Structures are given as C-alpha cells and as structure tokens.
Image (cartoon, helix red, strand yellow):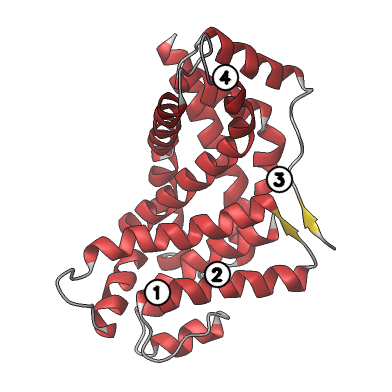
C-alpha cells in the first residue's frame, strides 16, 4: 500500500462555513472550532492510525524504560534501537525509526500518521531538553534521569498535552493552510504574510490551551494503568485515543461558545 493522504474538505457544508467565517473576519477560536468540526472524520481516524497509536504508545513506554538499570536494552525491547549509553537525540531519532518500521509492517503510511510521528519526536524533545544542562552537553545519566521523570503521572500528563497540542494544531493547519493563502492581500482577511503568520501563532496557542483538558485526563489514566494496573498496552492506547480527541473537540467548541 502507498501513502494515504487526508481527504479534501472543500466541498463539504461545514468547510464552506469555515471559508465564510474567514471572509467575515471571525476570531481564531471560531475558526479553530469550525475547522475541527469540518475535519472531525480525520480526527476520529487518528485514533486508529497505526503510526499515531504506535508513536503515542512508545511515549508511554520510554519514560518507564528510563527508570530501569538497563535503559538502552529496555529501549531495544521496544524496537527503539540506540547505542549504549543513549543521548536524547539518539532516543528521539530511534523512536522515529521504530514508528517507521512499525508502519511499514502494517502496510501503509498516512499524512496523519506522519504528523503524529513528528509530534511525538518534537514533544519528547520539547519536554526533556529544557531540563538538561545547557552550559555543557548532558551526560547519559542526566538524559536518562530527565526522561525517567516523565514516568510520574503529573509529568507524563505534560508530555501527553504537548503531543496532542502539536498534533491538533498540525491537523487543523493541514486543512486551513490551503484556504488561508486565498485570504491574503488588499481587502482580504490578512493584509500580508505577517498578518497570516500572526493567525498561525494564535491557532497554535489556541490548540495548546484547548489541550489542557487532555493533560488533566492523561495523568490519571497513566497512573491508574501503570501503577495500579498491569501496565499500558497498545490496546489501552487505542481505547484512550478517541476519548482524548473527543475531549479536545469539545473544548474547542466550548472556547468558541465562550467567546460569542
């Protein structure tokens, strides 16, 4: 099977509403909520995408591997093949490679899966890197400790929020970026590229704020399964994903309604 691209929304009634609200100058909250509704099928499909499921499952497992005495070996058992001792960059690169191999074995790649893969790599880097020493290169022990801290429920929740914020923003931008280019110029929604860039930044911030609902949900879910249950399996992630996306869509609608 080849690369599967997300469907085009341009002919749907909901997408025509997005276009009309853009023309009328609606705020980013209104546009984000309407775009999420128009792209609802794609967001629902994310919950079953092999790359998404595997990438997020690996994010649940890497911190637990870092808690053990044989970090590189435990990563290897997850399919994340790194030299011993691993650096942060080698871990995130190997995580991406592990997702690639998994997707090839499943027989297909999607745009949405690629966005999830990038969101996983970026999220782990964004959460861990600021906690490492900046004056000198961090040693492997420091890298392992920093990643291992994410195995706590409250720390993992921040990682989950980062992941879903990035993936939601990427998914909405996947559709919106095609339309926004039609609204730049004299008499249009955006006077120039700088104004369009400001909208992009606002959309990113809006998705990040909306993803707070996942942060609250993910911490309890992670702690319950890891420390009170038998651990997290890919099936646990498959059940968690649609609930998380549903919460984000509901939060986007709630924020839109609060602004009206």
The residue carrying pointer 3 sits among few (fewer than 14), some (14 to 19) or many (20 or more) residues within 10 Å by Cα, namely some
Tell me, yes or no, whether the two marked residues, 3 and 2, touch with CB atoms within 8 Å: no
Q: Quadrant of residue 201?
A: top left
Q: Quadrant of residue 148?
A: bottom left
Q: Which of labels 1 and 3 is toward the front?
A: 1
| Of callouts 2 and 4, the N-terminal one | 2
Residue 49 vs residue 4, the one in the foreground: 4
Q: Which mark is residue 89?
A: 1
Which quarter shows the N terminus?
bottom right
The residue carrying pointer 2 sits among few (fewer than 14), some (14 to 19) or many (20 or more) residues within 10 Å by Cα, namely many
Residue 210 screen position, x and y as percent: 43, 33
The residue carrying pointer 1 sits among few (fewer than 14), some (14 to 19) or many (20 or more) residues within 10 Å by Cα, namely some
Q: Which mark is residue 45?
A: 3
Residue 60 screen position, x and y as percent: 47, 65
Label 2 and label 4: CA atoms lie apart by: 35 Å
Above or below 177: residue 86? below
Residue at 55% x, 85% y is 77
Q: To which residue does mark 4 refer?
A: 183
Q: To which residue does mark 2 refer?
A: 96
**Disc 4, SS:** helix
């Amino acid at each position: 099977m080849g690369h599967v691209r997300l469907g085009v929304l341009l002919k749907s009634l909901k997408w025509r509403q997005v276009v009309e609200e853009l023309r009328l100058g609606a705020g980013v909250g209104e546009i984000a909520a309407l775009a999420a509704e128009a792209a609802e099928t794609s967001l629902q499909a994310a919950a079953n995408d092999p790359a998404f499921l595997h990438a997020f499952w690996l994010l649940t497992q890497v911190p637990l591997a870092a808690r053990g005495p044989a970090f590189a070996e435990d990563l290897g058992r997850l399919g994340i093949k790194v030299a011993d001792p691993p650096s942060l960059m080698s871990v995130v690169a190997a995580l991406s490679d592990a997702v690639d191999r998994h997707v090839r074995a499943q027989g297909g790649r999607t745009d949405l899966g690629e966005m999830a893969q990038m969101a996983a790599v970026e999220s782990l880097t964004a959460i861990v890197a600021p906690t490492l020493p900046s004056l000198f290169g961090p040693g492997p022990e420091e890298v392992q400790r920093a990643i291992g801290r994410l195995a706590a429920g409250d720390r993992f929740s921040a990682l989950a929020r980062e992941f879903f914020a990035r993936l939601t923003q990427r998914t909405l931008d996947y559709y919106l970026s095609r339309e926004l280019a039609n609204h730049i110029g004299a008499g249009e929604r955006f006077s120039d590229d700088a104004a369009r860039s400001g909208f992009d930044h606002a959309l990113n911030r809006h998705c990040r704020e909306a993803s707070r609902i996942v942060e609250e949900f993910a911490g309890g879910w992670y702690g319950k399964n890891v420390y009170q249950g038998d651990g997290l399996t890919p099936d646990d992630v498959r059940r968690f994903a649609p609930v998380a996306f549903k919460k984000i869509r509901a939060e986007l609608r709630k924020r839109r309604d609060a602004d009206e």
